[in-house]
Image (tube, rainbow, N blue to C red):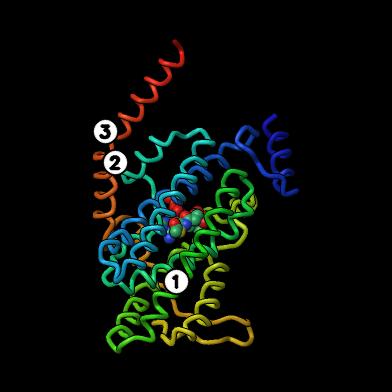
Amino acid sequence: SVQELEKIFQDKVDQEIKIEPKDWMPDAYRKTLVRQISQHAHSEIVGMLPEGNWISRAPSLKRKAILLAKVQDEAGHGLYLYSAVETLGTTRNQTIEDLHSGKAKYSSIFNYPTLTWADIGAIGWLVDGAAILNQVMLCRASYGPYARAMVRICKEESFHQRQGFEILLVLSKGTPEQQAMCQDAINRWWWPSLMMFGPKDSESTHSDQSMTWKIKRKSNDELRQQFVDMIVEQAKILNVTLPDPALQWNAERGHYDFGEIDWVEFWNVVKGNGPCNKQRLEARRKAWDEGAWVRDAAAAHAEKRKARQEV
Ligand code: ACO
């Protein structure tokens, strides 16, 4: 019976045995994985846009090569994740169609503009820093293909974060204009980075179930706190301030206290009304349409090869 199957499934999860594509799983588990992994894949792909904006304007050949490699890494992450979704029985075309129709979500953070070169540093340091904390726990997710994809992704993300920090470190030791540019980027990216972790635990619809299924291992608020504690220390090395007057060490809790996130802004961006939502989706649809001939040619080539082998 379904109850028995569910019990066997949950026992496996509790014993830390990975769930694999052909194993029995509850429909709701499959559905939540498809939702989360596809959102994650879209975030990687849409995330290429704000950074791609600076490839042709990076300040040196070396910076350009590094940024190019990083943006290519993000494409690779998207591809592993789309493959992980396919193992759950949803085609890549369907997943991508859901992004283009506006049905599927992707991380709110990628709907903010990259105005200066320092933004590339701030994205690496703060955005990739936040992404890593979340993804390190996902390396232990109960679904095998997702967990394994995360291991490789985390290694690359660590490099991304270091390169972002290093960009800011150079700027922070530069001219007064460069220092101001560094501070301005941090001022603009700080709050959106905190929003990446999602709504407060009390407002998070999926957390409890995802924790029971061991898809998530830490709650949105726990990870957000861990991020604040980590970044405050690193900001001291950069000699910059974080734009939150409420930020203060709390000896009793052993953590930094911080101010309230603007949740109206968060939901506004999630619902499609952030500064760049329309632009991002348009860019993705355009890339898909313009790439149609490549997909057609690849399919025709595969057909021909197959026909030749059959002779
Ligand atoms: N941006 C957009 N939507 C969000 C965000 C965000 N930052 N945070 C939460 N949401 C959405 C959820 O997707 C969910 O909507 P849905 O029911 O329509 O899917 C809703 O808000 C409620 O949130 P939760 O119940 O807390 O959702 P969940 O348990 O899935 O937790 C989280 C959200 C932490 C983002 C989780 O999905 C996750 O770990 N995802 C994988 C990591 C990821 O996607 N990272 C992307 C950015 S990093 C990068 O790409 C470099």
Q: Residue at x 38, y 84 (%)?
A: 172
Q: Quadrant of the N terminus?
A: top right
What amino acid is at disc 2? Trp
Residue 252 lies left or right of residue 81; in this view the side is right
**Residue identified by numbered label 1:** 125
What amino acid is at disc 3? Trp
Circles 1, 2 touching at the beta carbon (< 8 Å) = no
- Whether residue 265 is visible: yes
Crowd around label 2: few <14 · some 14–19 · many ≥20 (10 Å) = some
Circles 3, 1 touching at the beta carbon (< 8 Å) = no
**Spatial separation of the CA atoms under disc 1 and disc 2:** 30 Å
- Is residue 49 depicted above or below 133 in this figure? above
Q: Residue at x 62, y 82 (%)?
A: 253
**Residue identified by numbered label 3:** 293
Question: What is the x, y in percent for residue 297?
Answer: 31, 29
Question: What is the x, y in percent for residue 147?
Answer: 60, 49
Q: Earlier in the sequence, mark 3 or mark 1?
A: 1
Which image quadrant is residue 47 in? bottom left
Q: Earlier in the sequence, mark 2 or mark 3?
A: 2
Q: Residue at x 49, y 66 (%)?
A: 130
**Spatial separation of the CA atoms under disc 3 and disc 1:** 37 Å
**Residue identified by numbered label 2:** 288
Question: What is the x, y in percent for residue 51?
Answer: 33, 61
**Helix, strand or loop status at disc 1:** helix
Which image quadrant is residue 21 in? top right
